[in-house]
Image (tube, rainbow, N blue to C red):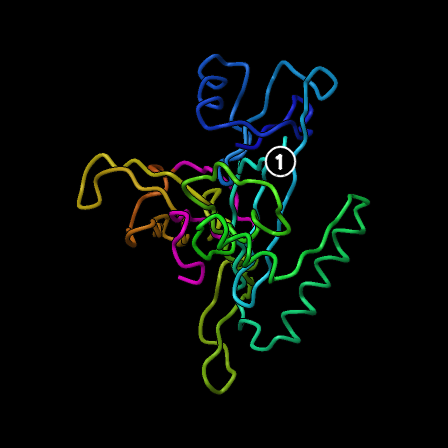
Amino acid sequence: MLVLDKRGRPLQPCTPARARKLLAASPAVVHRHTPFVIRLKDRTVGESEILGVEVGVDPGSKATGVGVFIAQADVRTGLLAGILRQAKTPLRDAAAASSTRWALWRALTGTGLPVAVATGGRTKWNRHRTGAPKTHTLDALHTGALDTVTRWPDTALVATSTGRGSHARTRSDRYGFPRLRLPRTKQVHGFATGDLVHAVVPTGVERGTHTGRVAVRSTGRFNIRTGASLVQGIHHRHIRLLQRADGWAYTRQPEGAPTHA
């Protein structure tokens, strides 16, 4: 889990079990729902011990794998796994994929942090040496590795680009003439399409709890897209905001599942 100090600066990541203990003891609060981030209320960076982490990146044509790990005594311990998926047409040729890799390398070197580049052959050799399946996240962990990989998260966070959306005042027909009038604002009763919400419906056909991305309606009855289905017609008074839309859709998948699924 990602951890911040009381001023919002990053600290050493911790395990989910450690995060639960910190939240139960109340020196920590939830800073962000997805990806899950906690913030310590009683500690700053200067008062904390930070071992430091390393980040491996494995760019691909359809998705990019990211692995965060600790390397100590020739042993790599995976802490976080993530997959970034692009919403537009995947890169179709090696030249385009290579240009994306070099653009990523230039962006990272511009931060002033040390950056090492490894070949795909070395990554493949490390993967076969450890018997790991081929996924972007595990390749990110094994990139350039000569040390032993010991532990890796069971699930990977998948972030898919959705964009910020658009806001038009009208909808046009096939001839270009306006046919609908839309609201002036994107928010309805404090919610906007794409926000992550949690709904508790006490009665009716949709009775139960639902968590997902909301689609707002001027009537005040919204639709919620959960991980399994689309729940329609939930009144806004039953809905609680978890996180504003940030242009990404987040899911989780078991480590080792196909990256492009």
Report whether 159 appears left or right of 220: right
Secondary structure, mark 1, is loop
Q: Which range of residues does the magenta coloring cover?
A: 240-261
- Tell me the residue that label 1 is attached to: 74
**Mark 1 is on which residue type?**
Asp
Q: Position of residue 155 (x, y in %)?
A: 42, 43
Residue at image position (51%, 56%) is: 136
Report whether 100 appears left or right of 189: right
- Whether residue 256 is in magenta: the answer is yes
Residue at image position (56%, 59%) is: 163
Q: Quadrant of the C terminus?
A: bottom left
Report whether 104 appears left or right of 242: right
Q: Nearer the viewer, residue 158 or 55?
A: 55
Say how many tags the image has.
Answer: 1
Residue at image position (56%, 68%) is: 61
- Camera sees residue 194: yes
Q: Nearer the viewer, residue 147 or 253?
A: 147
Q: Nearer the viewer, residue 74 or 17?
A: 74
